[in-house]
Image (cartoon, rainbow, N blue to C red):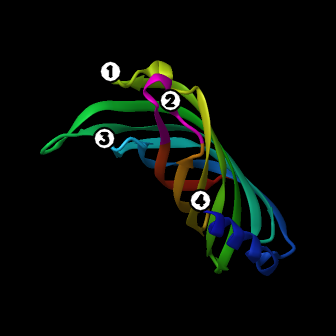
Amino acid sequence: MKKFIISMFFLLPLVITAQPFLTAGIKGGINSSKVTFRKSEFTSESILKTHVGAFARVGYGNVYLQPELYFSAKGGEVLEKGPNISERITRFDLNNVDVPLLLGINIVNGERSNLHIIAGPVFSFLASKNIEDHDDFSKEYLKDHYYGYQYGVGIDFWNFFLDARMEHGANNLYSYPTENLSGKNQTFMITLGFKIL
């Protein structure tokens, strides 16, 4: 991640051209998310969810800031390793309001399309949360908010864009203090956006 961000800033003097712009639109897509734990007896499995919301871009030349606001369903399954097979012991089902603030750079410009890289922090607020009952897991130990970072690559074509991003939690989404059990969000996202303005 550090190398990715550093490379973006080294590209700044190469890609800036003098033309300010502002765009906004809607976006939606799919999430493949899971909650990861350090304890070796647990493994995490991803589940498919969706997200939908809005975005804006304000920039100068080939560099822009992209704030977003969207509703995102996330979660994941937790398996306990057995002698022969892993057994599912719980499932996280979460509905978030996510607010990323991303830096984007167009690295390849075409006549009707361009290729961009994008990265930045994301702030997540839980609107609803549910965990299947288990001795080690209870929804009372889920945080109401957490933060992380996103990075990825995408393509703009006509009034659309298509992004592929990774999201990693920077702090714990789940923390069970008496069991020293904590978990973080990890999500892979595919997003299709449409520019209205």
For the residue carrying disc 4, how many other residues have a C-alpha within 10 Å: few (<14), some (14-19), or many (20+)?
Answer: many
Q: Reading the chain from its start, which is encountered first: label 3 or label 4?
A: 3
Q: Find numbered disc 2 in the image and state the secondary structure of the residue it sits on.
A: strand
Q: Is residue 152 above or below residue 196?
A: below
Per the model, the C-alpha gap separating discs 3 and 4 is: 30 Å
Q: Within the image, what quadrant is residue 44 found in? A: top left
Q: Name the spot of residue 58 as percent of width and height, x first.
A: 78, 57
Instruction: Give the residue displayed 55% in from the left and 37% down from the top.
Output: 172
Is residue 181 in the magenta section? yes
- Residue type at mark 3: give it: Glu
Q: Earlier in the sequence, mark 1 or mark 4?
A: 1
Among numbered discs 4 and 2, the one appearing first in the sequence: 4
**CA gap, disc 4 and disc 2:** 25 Å
**3 and 1 marks in contact (CB < 8 Å):** no
Q: Residue 170 at x, y = what percent?
A: 60, 45
Q: CA distance from mark 1 to mark 4?
A: 35 Å
- Region rendered in magenta: 171-184
Density class for disc 2 (Cα within 10 Å; few <14, some 14-19, many ≥20) is some
Check if mark 3's residue and mark 4's residue have beta carbons within 8 Å: no
Residue under pointer 4: 151
